[in-house]
Image: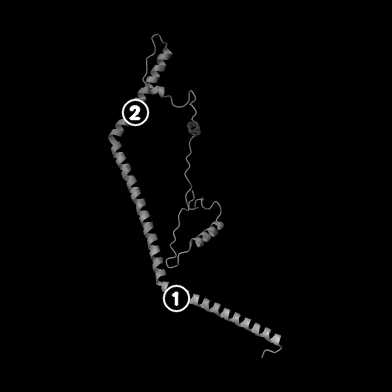
C-alpha cells in the first residue's frame, strides 16, 4: 500500500482548474521523476518499526504453533501438576509417596498464589481498570487536541493563501488579458508582415515577367 494516498490541491484558488488531460500529463511527469520505491518507502524522519525479540525457546515455540506441529513429549509446561491429585496405590514404595508429596506441594503453592491474585483482583482490579481507562482517555484527548491544532494551522495557512491570492486576482486577470492582447497583436503583425512579403514577392515576380524594374 503506498504511503502517499491523497493530495491537497490548495494552491490554485484563482487559477482555472486544469483539465483531466493536463492532470494526467503532470502526474505522468511526476511519476517519471520518482524512483519505483519512493511511494512505499517510509520517510527518513519516521521512527523505525518496532520488532520484538524473544528468547530462542519462545521463538521455537512460536514457529511450532505457526506450523501446527504437536508438542514434543517432556517439553513445555506440565499442566498435570496443577490437577487434582490421587494418592498412590496401597503398597506403593517410598519413592511414589515422595513424588506424590512433591506434586501436592506444587499444587498447593499454585492454588495459594492463584487465590492471592484473585483476592487482589477483586479488591484492586476495578480501580486499576478505571485508572487505566482514565489514562487512555487522557492520551486520546491529548492526541485529539494535537490533531485539532494541526487542522487549525492548516486551515489558517490555506485561508491566508486564499486571501493573498484573492487580493491580487484583479491584477492577475488584467495581466492575463494584457498578455493575451499582446500575443494577439504580435500574431496579427506577423500575419500582416507575411502578407506584405508575399505581395512584394508577387509584384517582383510579375515585374520580372513583364521586364519592368521595381521602383
Q: Residue furthest front?
A: 210
Q: Quadrant of the C terminus?
A: bottom right
Local packing at callout 2 (Cα closer than 10 Å; few below 14, some 14-19, many 20+) is: few
The answer to which of 78 and 41 lies nearer the viewer is: 41
At 28% from the left and 33% from the top, the residue drawn is 122
C-alpha gap between disc 1 and disc 2: 84 Å
Front-most of 168 and 192? 192
Give percent across and percent down for residue 109: 36, 25
Q: Secondary structure at mark 2?
A: helix
- Whether 98 is drawn above or below 197: the answer is above
Q: Which mark is residue 22?
A: none
Q: Earlier in the sequence, mark 1 or mark 2?
A: 2
Q: Is residue 64 above or below residue 196?
A: above
Q: Position of residue 196 (x, y in %)?
A: 60, 83
Q: Quadrant of residue 33?
A: bottom right
Residue 160 as seen in the image, left or right of residue 57: left
Question: Helix, strand, or loop for circle 1?
Answer: helix
At a point 51% along the width and 62% down the height, the residue shown is 22
Q: Where is mark 1, residue-wise? A: 174
Q: Position of residue 203 (x, y in %)?
A: 65, 85
Q: Quadrant of residue 113?
A: top left
Q: Which residue is mark 2?
A: 114
- Farthest residue in the bottom direction? 215
Residue 20 visible? The answer is: yes
Q: Quadrant of residue 133?
A: top left
- Compare residues 51 and 199 and report the one nearer the observer: 199
Amino acid at each position: 500500500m503506498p504511503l502517499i494516498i491523497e493530495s491537497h490541491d490548495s494552491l490554485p484558488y484563482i487559477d482555472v482548474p486544469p483539465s483531466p488531460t493536463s492532470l494526467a500529463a503532470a502526474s505522468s511527469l511526476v511519476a517519471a521523476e520518482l524512483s519505483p520505491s519512493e511511494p512505499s518507502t517510509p520517510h527518513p524522519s519516521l521512527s523505525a518499526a518496532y520488532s520484538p525479540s524473544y528468547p530462542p525457546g519462545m521463538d521455537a515455540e512460536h514457529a511450532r504453533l505457526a506450523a501446527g506441529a504437536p508438542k514434543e513429549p517432556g517439553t513445555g509446561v506440565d499442566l498435570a501438576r496443577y490437577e487434582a491429585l490421587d494418592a498412590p496405590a496401597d503398597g506403593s514404595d517410598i519413592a511414589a509417596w515422595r513424588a506424590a508429596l512433591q506434586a501436592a506441594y506444587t499444587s498447593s503453592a499454585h492454588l495459594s498464589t492463584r487465590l492471592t491474585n484473585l483476592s487482589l483482583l477483586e479488591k484492586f482490579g476495578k480501580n486499576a481498570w478505571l485508572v487505566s481507562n482514565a489514562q487512555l482517555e487522557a492520551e486520546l484527548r491529548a492526541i485529539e487536541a494535537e490533531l485539532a491544532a494541526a487542522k487549525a494551522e492548516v486551515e489558517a495557512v490555506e485561508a491566508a493563501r486564499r486571501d493573498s491570492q484573492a487580493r491580487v486576482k484583479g491584477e492577475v486577470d488584467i495581466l492575463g488579458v494584457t498578455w493575451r492582447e499582446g500575443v494577439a497583436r504580435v500574431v496579427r503583425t506577423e500575419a500582416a508582415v507575411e502578407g506584405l512579403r508575399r505581395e512584394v514577392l508577387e509584384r517582383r515576380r510579375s515585374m520580372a515577367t513583364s521586364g519592368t524594374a521595381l521602383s
